[in-house]
Amino acid sequence: MLPDPLHPAVVHFPIVLALLAPAIAIGLFWAIETRKLPARAWLVVVLLQAVIFGAGWLTAETGEEEEERVERIVREDPIEEHEEAAEWFIWIAGITLPIAGAGLLSGGLGTGARGVAFVGTLMAALAVAQVGHTGGELVYKHGAALAYLDGPTVTKAMGRKAMKKLLSGSSLEIPAVLDGSGGGSGDPSNDSGQNRRGRE
């Protein structure tokens, strides 16, 4: 059975791989240029870049499926910022892929392609870092995770005034009770009961 929602479960794969890609690319570039490895060793970078592009595209598709649900909680601007960052990442990864493929060639053409592909992996890493940053803001700053809780649970955890503030589009930090931190039990009803017993 697939996780629900799927987007948070798959989003980390392209992020981690894209951040690792520049180190792998520069290592293989050096090894090939110093003749420690043949040019065909660059196939590792090509395959890695193909996985990054494919995983990025799949992650974006799963994000679009969740967009309507999250829009009930989060304003449109931060969602669009996250989408635009993801689109830039996919474009960069897609353009880098055929250039990396040309790096399998021998001679000066292959060397040049490998160098350009390395730059492409750096750009993709910067782009995916922005994707992760904007995605993190959606969850931890704008409360996107609340879209997956039922109304009564959210109201109990946050209170009616806080819910009205969130739904009006105001910035609101998610209380610790929702993520199980902050010393509470994670159950608002239990915490309130403990407070009452303490007062008695």
Image (cartoon, grey):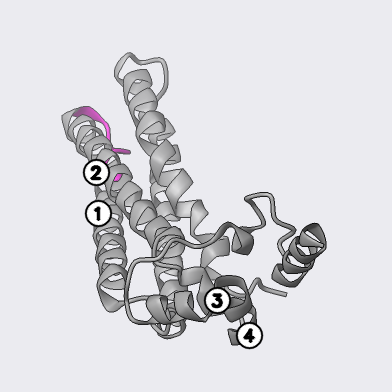
Mark 4 — residue?
152
- Mark found first going from the N terminus, 4 or 1: 1
Return the mark for residue 123: 2
- Quarter that holds the N terminus: bottom right
Q: Are marks 2 and 1 in contact (CB under 8 Å)?
A: yes
Q: In what element is the residue under mark 4? A: helix
The residue that appears at 68% across and 49% down in the rendered structure is 183
Q: Which kind of residue does numbered mark 2 sit on?
A: Met
Taking the image as shown, residue 62 lies to the left or right of residue 151, namely left
For residue 186, say whether it is visible. Answer: yes
Is 114 included in the stretch rendered in magenta?
no
Would you identify the image quadrant in which residue 176 lies?
bottom right
- For marks 4 and 2, give the CA distance: 44 Å
At 32% from the left and 38% from the top, the residue drawn is 104
Q: Name the residue tied to disc 1.
A: 92
Q: Amino acid at mark 1?
A: Ile
Residue 30 or 122: which is nearer the viewer? 122
- Mark 4 or 3, which is nearer the eye? 3
Q: Which mark is residue 180?
A: none
Mark 3 to mark 1 CA distance (whole Å): 43 Å
Asked if marks 3 and 1 touch (Cβ < 8 Å), the reply is no
Tell me where residue 148 appears, x and y as whole percent: 57, 77
**Location of residue 142 by image quarter:** bottom left
The residue identified by callout 3 is 159
> Which range of residues does the magenta coloring cover?
100-107
